[in-house]
Image (cartoon, rainbow, N blue to C red):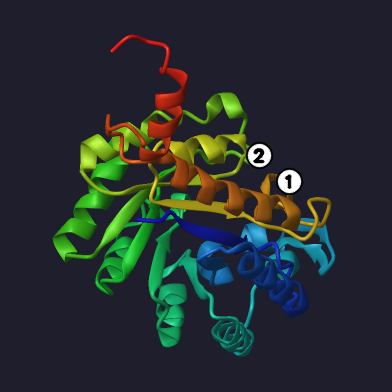
Amino acid sequence: MSIFIIAEIGINHNGDLDITKKLIDVAKTAGADAVKFQKRTIDAVYTKELLDSPRESPWGTTQREQKEGLEFSEKEYQEIDSYCRKKDIAWFASAWDLDSQKFLRQFDCKYNKVASAMLVYEPLLRMIAEEKKHTFISTGMSDITDLDRAVAIFKEAGCPYEVMHCVSTYPLDEGDANLKRIDSLRNRYGCNVGYSGHEVGLAVSYAAAALGITSLERHITLNRSMYGSDQAASVEPAGFTMLVGAVRKIENAMGDGSFDVNQKELEIAKKLRAHIPS
């Protein structure tokens, strides 16, 4: 089974549909399987006190203006849906509240995503699980008790899922990647395990691919110097194209682990061992 590669657009679109379409094009050209967004109902996710607090951004001087500037409307999501269909690439989103999950249902996306921050929000997990769509469950910021509870919800609902190893620092220090947890998750839950990475560079993602992950998610951006909290932990177009190409080569190189001699070696062996007495 080929690694399912997700280009996480998230909020790197900065509320701009032209940037969004360019990022979708980047993902499609590179060979990603899907693009992913984030959906929030601002007044449900953030307190009034925080929303009223100051924050300088391209949209104004308050947290509310910044966060509302990053949210797409129903009309804009309809355009995203249409554009992804035109480009023949799947899209889906991680909802951060119940109303956002309900909102996303109108688009009938094939996949769901539980963001690491939402792993402990049981009502949302149950709402997602009841849809019975294949769900990617990120594990950042969560202990084993949290994860056991989340996995149990999806099992009880009969909803297909895979967990994604994730460390929620932006950007991730390579020394904190703890890739051996991929095997630990696989052994504990007996399910497919993916990797959602926030590191700078590609080496950690290559290593994850070699550890047998079934999905790989990386944030993408047009330029890491753009405005936004996730840009520094994102991959630019050339890097993302390199990532997808290398992951496909790694998959091809892994083989089946058999001890059989490669048939291409036989003639070489005949020549190089010709001087050895039979």
> What residue did someone put label 1 on?
232
Foreground pick, 54 / 60: 60
Q: Quadrant of the N terminus?
A: bottom left
Identify the element where label 2 is drawn.
Answer: loop
**Label 1 amino acid?**
Ala
Q: Determine whether 172 is above or below 22 in the image.
A: above
Q: Are marks 2 and 1 in contact (CB under 8 Å)?
A: yes
- Residue at 74% across, 54% down: 238
Using residue 217 as the reference point, say whether residue 98 is left or right of it. left
Foreground pick, 256 / 104: 256
Q: CA distance from mark 2 to mark 1?
A: 6 Å
**Is residue 141 at all visible to an observer of this figure?**
no
Residue 134 image-quadrant placement: bottom left
Q: Determine whether 184 is above or below 38 in the image.
A: above
Mark seen at residue 123? none
Q: Residues within 10 Å of mark 2 (few under 14, many from 20)?
A: some
Image position, residue 4 (x, y; %):
44, 58
Image position, residue 241 (x, y; %):
67, 56
Image position, residue 29 (x, y; %):
66, 68
**Label 2 amino acid?**
Pro
Identify the element where label 1 is drawn.
Answer: helix
Q: Quadrant of the C terminus?
A: top left
Q: Determine whether 263 is above or below 74 in the image.
A: above
- Residue at 24% across, 72% down: 130
Mark seen at residue 171? 2
Q: Residues within 10 Å of mark 1 (few under 14, many from 20)?
A: many
